[in-house]
Amino acid sequence: MQFTKMHGLGNNYIFFNLLEMPMENEDFAELARTVSDVNFGIGSDGIILMCPSDVADFKMRIFNEDGSEGKNCGNGLRCVAKYLFDHMYATSTNFTIETLGGIVSVEVEADKKRVVRHVTIDMGKPQLLKGMIPMKGDPLSSAINESLSIGGQIYPMTCVSMGNPHAILFVDDVNEFPLEEVGPVIECADLFPERVNLGIVQVKNRQELHYRVWERGSGITMACGTGACAAVVAATLNHYVDRHIPITVQLPGGKLMISWDENDHVWKRGEAAYICHGELAIEGIIPVENK
Ligand SMILES: N[C@H](CCC[C@H](N)C(=O)O)C(=O)O
């Protein structure tokens, strides 16, 4: 089974090209748990499938390290867009990709050798209603700087869905905040029936945010594209940054340029890169639960 390992700002996934190999009846959750394991597998934040689509040019599915299926993946989308253009599946620099969180439009920037480095994605409209995050409470209300009681602590949270759920917490210093400790508590709080990605944000100035993430299903990663979008939406709603101008979001793995435009669409521009191509020797990999 052929695979490609790629990353967007260090948020790395094992990619399988289902345009060439259908992989029917595969247990993708188990495959994600197995190949994501750094000791018994390849080591990654999860797996991403590149598939045919009936409603867009292509389709992306993402499974987190724990085998749970994510509904969107901003860093993964840039990698998929690069792969599809570089390998000539996409013939235009503009095309669409279906995700469980909705259809996104991408634009790739290719060099003279037709190799992509930067990708811009229209991530669509953020969802703010609790019923759409989803989270408990009045489904027609939203959580903007709302004091949420979780694990005996009160957290002033702003919750945003970019097709997948994000809880955003503004802190004084992202490097001082105990993310390893608080992340799993908030990820699995009863308040979030489908769990949640926790993003912590430090406002550097009105054009720059620093962001770290505890991802649902993967824990701390080097970057989260949908989370960076949610951070800019939350910072705008809390009047820390201005709307319609590009905001630099600095993540541990690098930076993204994000803007929330006058049509309520969130745009994200950033890099994508290959790590390696390979052949998965499934028989050589011990399923994680058999360790
Ligand atoms: N853990 C996320 C999926 C991956 C999102 C992230 N890697 C990104 O780049 O957006 C979820 O379950 O909602």
Image (cartoon, grey):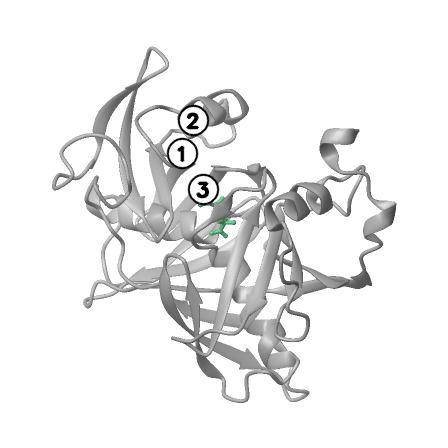
Q: Are marks 2 and 3 in contact (CB under 8 Å)?
A: no
- Judge left or right: residue 50 versus residue 224: right
| Identity of the residue drawn at 63% across and 62% down | 24
Residue 31 horizontal/vertical position (percent): 67, 48
- Quick check: can you spot residue 146? yes
Q: Residue 203: x, y in percent?
A: 36, 40
Question: Considering the numbered disc 1 on the image, is that residue within a helix, a strand or a loop?
Answer: loop
Disc marking residue 51:
none
Residues packed near mark 3 inside 10 Å, few (<14), some (14 to 19) or many (20 plus):
many
The quarter in which the C terminus is drawn is top right
SS for callout 3? strand
Judging depth in this view, the residue of 138 and 282 nearest the camera is 282
User: Disc 1 designates what residue?
Assistant: 195
In terms of depth relative to the viewer, which is nearer, 39 or 173? 39
Mark 1 / mark 2, whichever is N-terminal: 2
| Position of the N terminus by quadrant | bottom right
Identify residue type, mark 3: Tyr
State the separation of the CA atoms marked 1 and 2.
5 Å
Circles 1 and 2: CB atoms closer than 8 Å? yes
Of residues 224 and 248, the one nearer the viewer is 224
How busy is the neighbourhood of tag 2: few (under 14 within 10 Å), some, or many (20 plus)? some
**Which is more foreground, mark 2 or mark 3?**
2
The quarter of the picture where residue 126 lies is bottom left
User: Furthest residue to the right?
Assistant: 284
Local packing at callout 1 (Cα closer than 10 Å; few below 14, some 14-19, many 20+) is many
Q: Which residue is mark 2?
A: 188
Q: Are marks 1 and 3 in contact (CB under 8 Å)?
A: no
Q: Position of residue 166 (x, y in %)?
A: 36, 41
Residue holding disc 3: 211
For residue 177, say whether it is visible.
Answer: no
